[in-house]
Image (tube, helix red, strand yellow):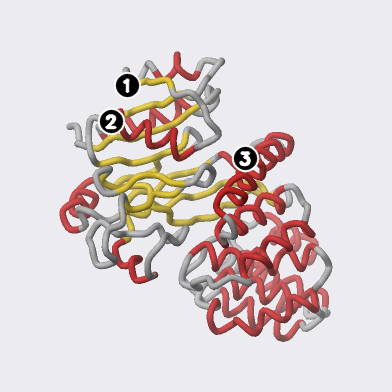
Amino acid sequence: MSYPISVCIIAKNEEQHIEECCKRILPYGFEIVLADTGSTDRTIELARKYTDRIYSFKWCDDFAAAKNFALEKASHDWILSLDCDEYIESVDLPALAACQRSHPTAAGRILIRNRFVENGQAACEQVRVSRFANRRCFHFEGAIHEQLVPIGAAPSDSACSAADSERPTSGPAANLKYVYSAPITVLHVGYSGTEEEMAAKSKRNIALLEKELNRHGADPYIYYQLGQSFRKLHDYEKALQYFDLGLAMDVDPALDYVQTMVESYGYTLLDLKRSQDALNLLGVYDVFSKRADFVFLMGLIYMNNGLFEQAVQEFAKAATIEEFAVDGVNSYKAHYNIGVIYECTGNTQEAKAAYRRCGAYEPALKRLKLLS
């Protein structure tokens, strides 16, 4: 059975990912539309196994322009936008059809699970991003880190005025009520490349973001993305400068990217060995502690300041919070850090108990073996 939904993809030299991306789409009966921006490898050849709707787009350093071109080539108005390194994990088709009926002109935020390696350990971070919408109401804007935004200057109470919660658009934050969670989960493997590949990608992003900044002026979202890009390059001083600029502006703490920017700001201070300065985040604790990631971060900050009792309390609290972005901050990573603190302070029995609560987490199993 086919569904009147088009999956729009842009690509350039993505032979490593394009086939798996298309394979994951096929079982759902969605149309696949590919806009190729100049591939010289086997990307187009491999894509032809799954779709004949392949078009060439002359690259112009503008991701939004390329994605909008793909939208125009689709047969259907309902669009799911994916990158080649994003693989569908699940789609609840009946629930998605219900969303189309109940939110006909709103933006659906799909769940993206970003897979990466941290300290030699596989890790995963999840975030919701608006990627499913009717092209009659939405298009993409932004040369880099492009976002779905409403077409035209619809009134704030219009059904077509939904704003992507990843990036604020013009108009009141109340527009967020027109965004809903779509029953689609996607695995993003683009952060799993080599260090050299990730560095090249970050440098490319920085160049495009700086162009956007020069073109449009101060923008907290662009500052946030610049900070994240410099963090990936381990240039923590530069990252901190951009996070400072972004957080100094009038930002809505309810937006996902603002929450992440605050957390990244805290981690950057720790990377710079400015643990005492990081304690200033206590001033926004009540605003951002609804998510386990921030509470976990506060545990690390206390830990780095030698305030072990407070650190244990924060990690224990993080383990009780349902909402999270990075896997483990409300479970095995929190318990592991409690175990480390107890072990370092000579409380071996409590340390063992904390490590056991980590399940199959390899670092905890190693500590248990050493303590047995």
- Residue at image x 45%, y 31%? 10
In the rendered structure, find residue 150 and report the number of the disc placed on it.
none
The C terminus, quarter of image: bottom right
Residue 24: give x, y in percent of width and height: 38, 33
Marks 2 and 1: in contact by CB < 8 Å?
A: yes
On the rendered structure, is 368 left or right of 320?
Answer: right
Q: Is 43 located above or below residue 368 in the figure? A: above
Q: Is 326 located above or below residue 76 in the figure? A: below
- Of the numbered discs 1 and 2, the one sitting upstream in the chain is 1
10 Å crowding of disc 3: few (<14), some (14-19), many (20+) = some
> Could you say whether the residue bearing mark 3 is in a helix, strand or loop?
helix
Discs 3/2, front? 2
* 251 or 189: nearer the viewer: 251
10 Å crowding of disc 2: few (<14), some (14-19), many (20+) = many
Please name the amino acid that badge 3 sits on: Ser
- Of the numbered discs 3 and 2, the one sitting upstream in the chain is 2
Q: CA distance from mark 1 to mark 2?
A: 8 Å
Q: Quadrant of residue 155?
A: bottom left
Mark 2, residue position:
74
Residue 166: give x, y in percent of width and height: 46, 58
Mark 1, residue position:
53
Discs 1/3, front? 1
- Residue at image x 48%, y 28%? 11
Q: CA distance from mark 3 to mark 2?
A: 30 Å
Q: Quadrant of residue 260?
A: bottom right
* 191 or 250: nearer the viewer: 250
- Residue at image x 55%, y 52%? 216
Mark 3, residue position:
192
